[in-house]
Amino acid sequence: MAKPAQGAKYRGSIHDFPGFDPNQDAEALYTAMKGFGGDKEAILDIITSRSNRQRQEVCQSYKSLYGKDLIADLKYELTGKFERLIVGLMRPPAYCDAKEIKDAISGIGTDEKCLIEILASRTNEQMHQLVAAYKDAYERDLEADIIGDTSGHFQKMLVVLLQGTREEDDVVSEDLVQQDVQDLYEAGELKWGTDEAQFIYILGNRSKQHLRLVFDEYLKTTGKPIEASIRGELSGDFEKLMLAVVKCIRSTPEYFAERLFKAMKGLGTRDNTLIRIMVSRSELDMLDIREIFRTKYEKSLYSMIKNDTSGEYKKTLLKLSGGDDDAAGQFFPEAAQVAYQMWELSAVARVELKGTVRPANDFNPDADAKALRKAMKGLGTDEDTIIDIITHRSNVQRQQIRQTFKSHFGRDLMTDLKSEISGDLARLILGLMMPPAHYDAKQLKKAMEGAGTDEKALIEILATRTNAEIRAINEAYKEDYHKSLEDALSSDTSGHFRRILISLATGHREEGGENLDQAREDAQVAAEILEIADTPSGDKTSLETRFMTILCTRSYPHLRRVFQEFIKMTNYDVEHTIKKEMSGDVRDAFVAIVQSVKNKPLFFADKLYKSMKGAGTDEKTLTRIMVSRSEIDLLNIRREFIEKYDKSLHQAIEGDTSGDFLKALLALCGGED
C-alpha cells in the first residue's frame, strides 16, 4: 500500500482498527464460516473495519491457527458479487490489481476499460508493485502479456505507463512547458495525420505538475483544451486511454468519481468496475472521491450505492464509502476545499470567452441582401442560403444587412423572413436577426405574457447578464413595449422571487475585486440564513434581505471569495446547501446566480443538456441559449458540455433535432469537438 507523503493528510475511508488482535479476528472469521449458511454479517463487519495491512495479519494468523487459507475458505463460503468484493479486500492492493489485469486479458476478448483504468491511474510505486505482484502470482511477465493481448498505439502507451517512470520532480521548466505545447500542437493540429509518438512520450513520461501547466498553456496557445485535440486527432481505445491519462493528471479523484457514476447510472450496474474502484481507493482517496461525486452529480456516493445495490454486497460497499455526504456532520474540510478548487480553477475568469459566430471576412451587405431576396422570391424558399448567410454573420453585420435590404427593396427583411419560414427554424433565424438586447427583452416579455409565467426563462436571462447587458435590455424593453421591465416584473411575480428579479434587473452589480473582510461577513450571513451557523445573529427578515443583496449585487470575484470562505466556515458548498435548505423559484434563482458566478459556460451547458435530455426537446430553451451565447461564449459552453456529459454538443443536437432547424443549430454550434 502506497503511503501518503509525509505531512499529507490521510484521505482514505478505511483506517487501522484500534485494539486490533489478528488471532481474535481469525477465530471470529472461522466461527462465522462454520455451520450451514455462515454469518455473512460478521464477515463483512470484520473485513471492512480493518485496514489492508491488518487483513494480511489476519490471513497469517488464520493459517497458523487452522492450517487453512482464509481466502480459499471465503471463496468457498461466499458467492457472487459479495464474494468478489470480500476476496478483493483480502488481497494486498498490488495483487488485487494483478488479478484484475489477468482477468482483463484472459480468454476471448480483452477488457480494455479495466486496463485503461488501472494503468492510467497508478503511481510509479504502485506500478512497480503491480509488475512484481503479477510475476509472483502468475509466474509471467506482465509487459509480455500486455503486448500479446493488445496492439498499435494503444499497446505502446500501455507499455510506457507500465514502466512506472513518470517524472516526479515538482520543479517545472517554463521553457520545457512551452516546447511540449509546441510539440503537441505540431504533432496534432498542425500536422496532416497525427504524430502519436509525441503524445505518447509527453503524456506518458512528464510529471503531473509539468503536464498541468502544459494543459493550461495549450489552451491559451490553441484556443482549445488538450482533450478536444485528443478527441480530434486520436481514435478508439488509444483515444480513451489518453483521455483517461489526462483526467488522472488533472484530478485522479475526479476521474474515479466519474467512473463510479457511470458504473451505476442507467439500467444495470457495472459491478466489476464498482468493486474494483471501491476496493482500490478505500485507503487512498475515497474521501476526495466522495466530495467530488457529491459536488459534480448533486447526490452522495453513499445514496447512489444504496439505491443501486442490495444485500450484504450493498452493506459492504456502504462501509467502504465511509459515510453519507448528504447526512448531517458528514462533510470534510479538506475535501470541501478540493471541491472548491475544482470549480474555482476552471472558473470563467481564467479562460478567455469565445463565441462560435464571428464577423464574416470580406463582408458585403449588398451581396447578402440580394442573395436573401433571391432565396425568398418565387415558388419555394431556399432555406439553405438563408441559414448559411445568417448563421455566418455577426449580429452587427446582420443589422447592416437589414438596413441594406430595406434600402434596396423597400421591404422589411424580418417581415419577409416571417412569411417564408416557420416553426422552430423561424424562431431561431428571427432571433438571430434581432439586436441581442431586443431579443432578450422579447424573451422576457414572452415569459410573462399570457396565463402562467416561465420563471425558468426569467431566471436564466436575469441571473446571467452583465450590468451593460441588463441596462441595454431595460432600454430595449421600454422602447419595444412602452413599459419598464421593473413594472412588468412587479406585475407578474411576487414575494422574495420578485425582489430577487427586480434587484437583478437594476443592473447594479458591483464590478470591483474581492474584499476579504467583507467576504467573511457575507459568508457568515449566508451560513446564518441557510441555518448552518453555530450562533445566529439578527432577525431572519433582515438576514434574508442581506443574503439577497449579497448574491444580487456583489461582484463575481468577490462572490467567489465568499463561497470559499463559506466552505472554510461550514465545510459545506453554498450551492449544495441552497438546494437542500430552500425551495421553489427563490431556490432556483439563487442556484442560478451561484452557478453563473462559479462557471457561467457550465451553467449554460447544463441548461442545454437538460433541454435535450429524455423524451421531447425544449426547443425554446435550446433556441434562446444558442442565439444569445453564439457570439459570447458558445465555444466555452461546448467545452464544458463535452467535459461533463462525455458527448459533444454537436452530437447531442444531431441526435435530438432534425431538418432545417438542425442545420441552423449545427451551423451556430461551430463544429464538432
Image: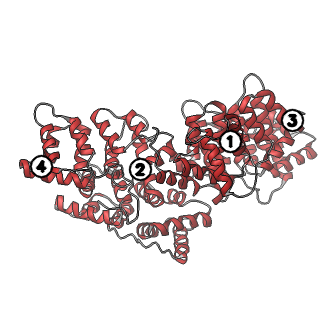
Label 3 crowd bin: few (<14), some (14–19), many (20+), radius 10 Å = some
Lower sequence index among marks 4 and 1: 4
Label 2 crowd bin: few (<14), some (14–19), many (20+), radius 10 Å = many
Q: Disc 2 residue type?
A: Leu
Residue named by callout 4: 62
**What quarter of the picture does the N terminus occupy?**
bottom left
Mark nearer the viewer, 3 or 2? 2
* Horizontal and vertical percent position of residue 542: 71, 37
Q: In this view, does 222 lie to the left or right of 313?
A: right
Q: Disc 3 residue type?
A: Ser
Mark 2 in CB contact with mark 4 (< 8 angstroms)? no
Residue named by callout 3: 484
Hey, which quadrant is residue 27 in on the image?
top left
Q: In this view, does 490 lie to the left or right of 223?
A: right
Lower sequence index among marks 3 and 4: 4
Residue named by callout 2: 287
Q: What element carries label 3?
A: loop
Residue sitting at x 55%, y 30%: 615
Q: In this view, does 333 lie to the left or right of 129?
A: right
Lower sequence index among marks 2 and 4: 4
Mark nearer the viewer, 3 or 1? 1
Label 1 crowd bin: few (<14), some (14–19), many (20+), radius 10 Å = many
**Camera-side residue of 10 and 151:** 10
Lower sequence index among marks 3 and 1: 3
Q: Residue furthest left?
A: 67
Q: Disc 4 residue type?
A: Tyr
Residue sitting at x 77%, y 52%: 394
Q: Is mark 1 on a helix, strand or loop?
A: helix
Residue sitting at x 34%, y 56%: 118
Residue sitting at x 74%, y 41%: 462
Work out how far the residue at label 3 is from the one at label 2, CA to CA, in angstroms. 51 Å
Residue named by callout 1: 547
